[in-house]
């Protein structure tokens, strides 16, 4: 029977004294060879004791060689270990230390975000102008309706039919203009949401740990580039003029 002190020095897999021990993120320790054999045919790298998914296996260890990912292959644009570097897959490839590669790629991604942020600013300006225009249309409609009613009150029943016609035309004008602004505002809102979501997600990637960032770098760049092709929004030029249904001569 092993003592408690011996248990602390024994690998939970082979039950022998540790040989080349490694510690997982869940704090359980194993022989490196035992852990590699345990993970060999498993799609998810879990702790053999507590079944916690190992951050070390998914991020800082090479999935092929189970070595620390200390390098970044500039040709394949992916993290690599020292065994990867010396393998046939990476013959004559250029490598950079993982921290230097992360720093460089983060700067590149930040540069990619600059035009998106400028475009977001323009979309927000256009949306603000559209909201202002929509509000003006509503206020203008109320004022115009008031004027029309005052004008036709003086004519009483004789001009009642014409008054009704003009009110109906005014409402139709408001409906058409408001509908156009509504569609434009909704379109701008969707594009703003897409841009904002991509920017937030990309900035989270930039703040992530180097390995995690580099694992997701290609996808992040692709998302940014997809939105970079959006057309620059056009500002609404001025507010609509007074309705044609107002006659100041009355």
Image: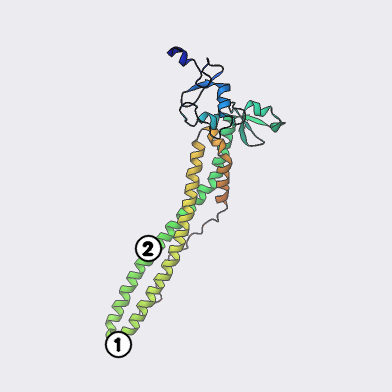
Q: Quadrant of residue 99?
A: top right
Nearer the observer, 223 or 17: 17
Give the quadrant of the N terminus: top left
The number of discs equals: 2
* Residue shown at 65% from the left, 30% from the top: 95
Question: On screen, 23 above or below 163?
Answer: above
Q: Are marks 2 and 1 in contact (CB under 8 Å)?
A: no
* Residue shown at 43% from the left, 60% from the top: 130
Question: Which mark, by number, is residue 166?
Answer: none
Label 2's element? Answer: helix
- Residue 240 relative to residue 202: left or right: left
Question: Which mark, by number, is residue 158?
Answer: 1
* Residue shown at 30% from the left, 73% from the top: 146
In the rendered image, residue 247, in percent from the top left (x then y), is placed at: 37, 78
In the rendered image, residue 18, in percent from the top left (x then y), is placed at: 53, 16
Which numbered disc, 2 or 1, marks the residue that appears first in the sequence? Answer: 2
Q: Which residue is mark 2?
A: 135
**The residue positioned farthest toward the front in the image shown:** 1
């Amino acid at each position: 029977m092993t003592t408690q002190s011996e248990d602390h020095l024994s690998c939970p897999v082979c039950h022998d004294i540790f040989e080349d021990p490694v510690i997982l993120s869940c704090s359980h320790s194993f022989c490196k060879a035992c852990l590699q054999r345990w993970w060999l045919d498993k799609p998810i790298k879990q702790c053999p004791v507590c079944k916690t998914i190992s951050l070390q296996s998914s991020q800082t260890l090479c999935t092929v060689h189970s070595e620390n990912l200390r390098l970044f292959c500039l040709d394949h644009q992916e993290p690599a270990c020292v065994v990867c570097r010396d393998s046939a897959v990476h013959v004559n490839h250029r490598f950079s230390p993982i921290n230097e590669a992360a720093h460089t790629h983060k700067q590149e991604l930040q540069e990619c975000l600059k035009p998106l942020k400028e475009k977001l600013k323009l979309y927000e300006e256009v949306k603000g102008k559209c909201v202002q225009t929509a509000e003006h249309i509503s206020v203008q409609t109320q004022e115009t309706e008031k004027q029309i009613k005052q004008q036709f009150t003086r004519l009483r029943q004789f001009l009642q039919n014409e008054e009704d016609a003009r009110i109906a035309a005014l409402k139709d004008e408001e409906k058409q203009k408001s509908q156009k602004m509504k569609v434009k505002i909704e379109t701008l809102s969707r594009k703003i949401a897409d841009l904002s979501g991509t920017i937030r997600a990309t900035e989270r990637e930039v703040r992530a740990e180097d390995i995690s960032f580099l694992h997701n770098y290609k996808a992040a760049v692709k998302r940014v580039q997809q939105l970079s092709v959006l057309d620059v929004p056009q500002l609404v030029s001025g507010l609509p003029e007074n309705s044609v249904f107002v006659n100041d001569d009355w």
